[in-house]
Image: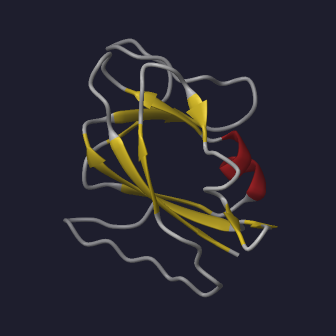
Amino acid sequence: MSGGRGRIVAVIDGAPGNTTRVVTTNSATNLAAGVITVSGKSSRFVMITCEVANVRYTLGSGATPTQGASGLGHILNPGQTLELDHGTAISTFQHISAIASTPGTLQITPET
């Protein structure tokens, strides 16, 4: 994860794809294939920035994020950025609104 004290630094040294806005829901969801590919190629890096409302996420197969105070998964707060730089982390990333009926907004930029 990059950043600290409000400063986010990301090095894009490949071909960036289109940034996509994703709104989280009450259902755990993986990133859509169209969001994590660039010109038909699988991404090797994805930058995910949370803009609105907390988002809970998990990585790895068999881990599905859940909502609520005792929910499973890490919290991504508004203003934080998560960087994934491995294919398995990218393909198994799942997200959900941390609080029921409070959608979060993620800005996602892939790179090949």
* Residue drawn at 65 percent across, 64 percent down: 85
- In this rendering, would 61 be left or right of 63? right
The colour scheme used here is: secondary structure
Q: Quadrant of the C terminus?
A: bottom right
Viewer-nearest residue: 82 or 41? 41
Q: Position of residue 75 (x, y in %)?
A: 38, 35
- In this rendering, would 73 be left or right of 29? left
Number of numbered callouts drawn: 0
Q: Is residue 109 above or below residue 9?
A: above
Viewer-nearest residue: 92 or 105? 105
Q: Position of residue 50 (x, y in %)?
A: 34, 50
Q: Position of residue 42 (x, y in %)?
A: 77, 64
Q: What is the residue that sits farthest to the bottom in this orientation?
A: 13
* Residue drawn at 34 percent across, 44 percent down: 105
* Residue drawn at 32 percent across, 16 percent down: 100
* Residue drawn at 58 percent across, 31 percent down: 29
Viewer-nearest residue: 91 or 9? 91
Q: Is residue 38 above or below residue 99?
A: below
- In this rendering, would 4 be left or right of 106? left
Q: What is the residue that sits farthest to the left in this orientation?
A: 5
Q: Is residue 100 above or below residue 74?
A: above
Q: Is residue 101 above or below residue 19?
A: above
Q: Position of residue 74 (x, y in %)?
A: 45, 34
